[in-house]
Image (cartoon, grey):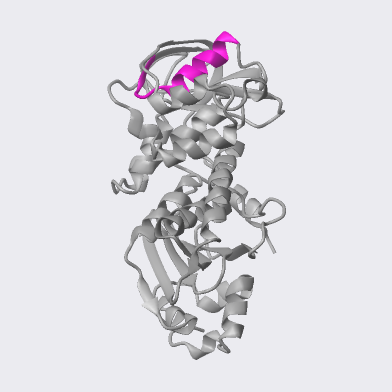
Amino acid sequence: MINKGSYLKELTSTMMMSPSVATGTEISGTSPPSVFIGQWNYPRVFAGPMVTPSHGDTTIMDMPEAWIPENRTQEEIIGYRLSLVRGTRRVDVTDIRSRYIETLQDVALSGASVESEAGFSHAPQGLSFSEEHTPHGPSAPLERFDITAGRWQRDLEKVYYDTDLPARDAILGLHGKNVPFSSIQKAFSTGTMGIERNRKLVPTRWSITACDTTIADNLLGWVKKCSVIDTVRVHEFSSLNNHYAVILLPTPWQYEWTEAFLHVLGNEEYVFSDYERHSRKNGYSPLGGCYYSCKMAVLERLAKEQRQAGVIVLREALKGYVPLGVFNVRENVRSAMSSMGNEFEDIGGALNYLATRFTLPLQRFADEGKLLKESLRGGQKTLSAFGGCS
């Protein structure tokens, strides 16, 4: 059986999109506050800005929190991302006092688009798609990078100058002030928070999961102290060729993430699942960063409601789906949890309803999902008992 990592690698290798922005060895424009830190060859990594020849306010190009609430289409999002050119330079993650890294920090902390000029060793080439991070256009080694520094985002600036504040407390404090997740992640990635002697660059992919996990673990501590909901609830949302259903159960905290990929490449039907019980999960999920992004998004809402629940999340990615990064999961699940939702007397009623909402028979989700299977067994039900299931 193919694992998710292998499947996504095959999927991203086939991505044939409209061409990314064409550029020569020089770029001058107004770029969003965007940086990318690679993970290959850690601790000697490739780090650099994401620049564009566009002018004006370009912040939307790197503000994933806005894309789904503003109903941006998949084509618009891909257009934003392929307009960004990645500059690269090999750096040591601990060398955060170099002029180059301080310039990257200026970009990451900026509260607005940044006037920038970049010179490359050759014309940038290629493009990158991933389930873990947002796509970007061509890349090339930087020979020169200059910016006109703007004003830093005030909350990020305070964290930068507080060199006695642990990174965990900085992340939680910024989240509590409703600073966008992407802004927190970029600031963390560029080594601008934490105890001064511990500060270093963190690869973009790692920093996303680190921020999701830090926030989720803190929220979970509060949620476990709350009373359990008294009925089964289902919250749904669809966008960008995905459908999500969050099933909340009247049980203490437990969590399962199950995702299906249907006919994205051809006739394939793959289902992947992972879960945790009431205690802390051991090890990193084989499903990657989306497991933690989804968990954080659900816990945000439960904490706001001051309620506890068991959580089973089903995701179906359909033909036309393109990997756009874990923001896709985080923001879709946030939107689902913000919906009114439907209440049911038991999980049987919830699955009866959901059988009409998914393309894949729900039995396939149950075959892979341990907690869903156990919930059905506890209710002495089988999926064949529900209309529309097979």
Q: Quadrant of residue 147?
A: top left
Q: Residue at x 66, y 52 (%)?
A: 6
Report whether 210 appears left or right of 250: right
Residue 243 higher or lower than 101, as above or below: below
Q: Position of residue 324 (x, y in %)?
A: 47, 45
Report the magenta stretch's main SS.
Answer: helix
Q: Quadrant of residue 112?
A: top left
Q: Residue at x 62, y 55 (%)?
A: 287
Q: How many marks on residues?
A: 0
The answer to whether any part of residue 10 appears in the image is yes
**Which segment did they paint magenta?**
98-115
Residue 318 versus residue 335: which sits nearer the camera? 335
Residue 71 higher or lower than 28, as above or below: below
Q: Position of residue 386 (x, y in %)?
A: 47, 87
Q: Position of residue 315 (x, y in %)?
A: 49, 63
Report whether 246 appears left or right of 55: right
Q: Residue at x 46, y 50 (%)?
A: 330
Q: Residue at x 42, y 33 (%)?
A: 82
Q: Position of residue 93 (x, y in %)?
A: 66, 22
Residue 275 versus residue 228: which sits nearer the camera? 228
Q: Quadrant of residue 67?
A: top left
Residue 187 higher or lower than 222, as above or below: above
The answer to whether any part of residue 320 appears in the image is no
Residue 183 falls within the magenta-colored stretch = no
Residue 64 higher or lower than 217, as above or below: above
Quarter of the picture containing the N terminus is bottom right
